[in-house]
Amino acid sequence: MTVDMVPARELLLETRFDAADLTKLRLRVDELASVAGLTDPRRAEFVLAMHEVACNAVRHGGGVGMLRLYLSVGSLHCRITDDGPGFDADIIPCSLPAPDTSESGRGLWLVRQIVDRMKIVRPSVGADVTCTMLLPLE
């Protein structure tokens, strides 16, 4: 792939966060998603997905994470990374876990259902999750 074929990206937000930042982060991502052209109800779903992944980063990833929100042609992306033990996509159940048989797994299952694409990378340290929503055609 040549450099000319790489889609242009516009970074909207890059910030480290911890549990105390989650509410402000949710509001900021909602605001930027709106400016980017994502409309409700998909904007609310995108913000919910971001919040679920960010909470997982805080809970399982060492208490802090890094969020990068960026635009590429026709889509909005939220990439969250952390320094925890990481995980593979195969831990996400194929169907909604029953509340009486599982203590976790519902958040990532939900994220996968509501975003257009979910990419999980397991680097040597931590987790790397990118959620993508397609923007409406103008």
Image (cartoon, rainbow, N blue to C red):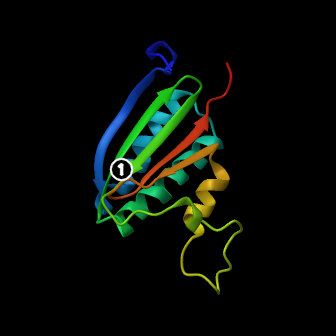
Tell me which residue sits at (40%, 42%) in the image. 28
Query: Residue 98: which quarter of the image?
Result: bottom right
Circle 1: is it few (<14), some (14-19), or many (20+) Cα within 10 Å? few
Residue found at x 51% / y 26%? 72
Quarter location, residue 20: bottom left
Question: What residue is rendered at 42% in x and 56% in y?
Answer: 54
Closer to the camera in the image, 40 or 119 = 119
Q: How many marks?
A: 1
Residue 37: percent from left, percent from top: 57, 28
Report whether 138 appears left or right of 131.
right
Q: Is residue 118 left or right of residue 15?
A: right
In the image, 37 versus 107, the foreground residue is: 107
Tell me the quarter of the image containing the C terminus: top right
Q: Is residue 58 above or below residue 15?
A: below
Q: Residue at x 43, y 44 (%)?
A: 79
Between 104 and 51, the one lying in front of the other is 104
Seen as rendered, the residue at the extreme front is: 1
Outermost residue, top side: 4
Compared with 13, 125 (above or below) is below
The image position of residue 73, as x and y in percent, is 55, 22
Rendering quarter of residue 55:
bottom left
Question: Mark 1 is on which residue type?
Answer: Lys
Residue 85: image x %, image y %? 36, 66
**Residue 119 locus on image (x, y percent):** 54, 47
| Direction from residue 99 to residue 126 in the image, left or right | left
- Which residue is identified by label 1? 24
What secondary structure is marked by label 1? Answer: helix
36 is higher (above) or lower (below) than 24: above
For the view shown, which residue lies furthest in the right direction? 95
